Amino acid sequence: MRNLARQVSMAASIAALLALSSVAGATIHTVHVGNFYFTPTKTTVNQADTVRWVLDGGSHSTTSDPSSPKAWTSGIIPSGGHFDVVFGVADGLGPFPYHCSVHPTTMKDTIFVNPPVVYKCGDANGDKSVNVGDAVYVINYVFKGGPAPTPVVGAGDANCDHAVNVGDAVYIINYVFKGGPAPCCP
């Protein structure tokens, strides 16, 4: 009976850890728009990230240049409002020049997109092999706030549950020491 209670307690603890340690993929990058400025300038994003232009004041827009591989136009953004654009894989790597349609010669900037990261499934620490160091890296990330695997969901998601958690560390240890299934890519 005690053994069953201990197993139930451990299962509940693992379930709680799994729920708490899931991660999100994309990031929202904020660019402020005001009287004759976009800030920060030359924003660099990853594929699937969002750029959010937030109007600080004045009458402004964000409009892609004709040379941009992705087209968008916000129209005049209302005071305190914002406009979002997602830069997906299908959009390519750019660059994505844009301007304010009200001030097209004085308010210009460009969005840059990082190339996709090439990684090995389960190689959380980026040393080009899957070993016990990857399990330690995942544990450090999940429990100690250590650096995230790159990409987070991919290199760190060894068991393909679309999250990086203690289950991935266990999966890697099982693979390395017990000959379990190889890490998979989500």
Image (cartoon, rainbow, N blue to C red):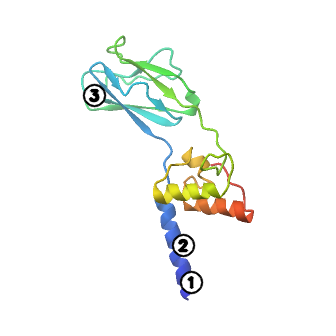
Amino acid at circle 3: Pro
**Which residue matches tag 1?**
4
Disc 1 marks a residue whose amino acid type is Leu
Residue at image mark 2: 11
In percent of width and height, residue 153 lies at 56, 48
Residue corresponding to mark 3: 78
Q: Residue at x 62, y 46 (%)?
A: 126
The amino acid type of the residue labelled 2 equals Ala
Residue at image x 47%, y 58%?
A: 144
> Can residue 159 be seen in this snapshot?
no
Seen at 56% across and 56% down, the residue is: 138
Task: Name the side, left or right, on which 127 lies relative to 82.
Answer: right
- In this rendering, the answer to whether 94 lies above or below 6 is above
- Quadrant of the image for the N terminus? bottom right
Query: Front-most of 87 and 142?
Result: 142
Q: Which mark is in front, 2 or 3?
A: 2
The answer for how far apart the CA atoms under marks 1 and 2 are is: 10 Å
Disc 3 is placed on an element classified as loop
Outermost residue, top side: 105
Q: Position of residue 14 (x, y in %)?
A: 53, 68
Cα separation, mark 2 vs mark 3, equals: 51 Å
Which is in the foreground here, disc 3 or disc 1?
A: 1
Q: Secondary structure at mark 1?
A: helix
Q: Residue at x 60, y 60 (%)?
A: 169
- Compared to residue 125, the image places residue 86 above or below, namely above
Q: CA gap, disc 3 to disc 1?
A: 60 Å
Compare marks 1 and 2 and give the one earlier in the sequence. Answer: 1
Give the mark nearest the N terminus, 3 or 1: 1
Q: Position of residue 42 (x, y in %)?
A: 43, 25
What count of labels does the image hold? Answer: 3
Q: Residues within 10 Å of mark 2 (few under 14, many from 20)?
A: few
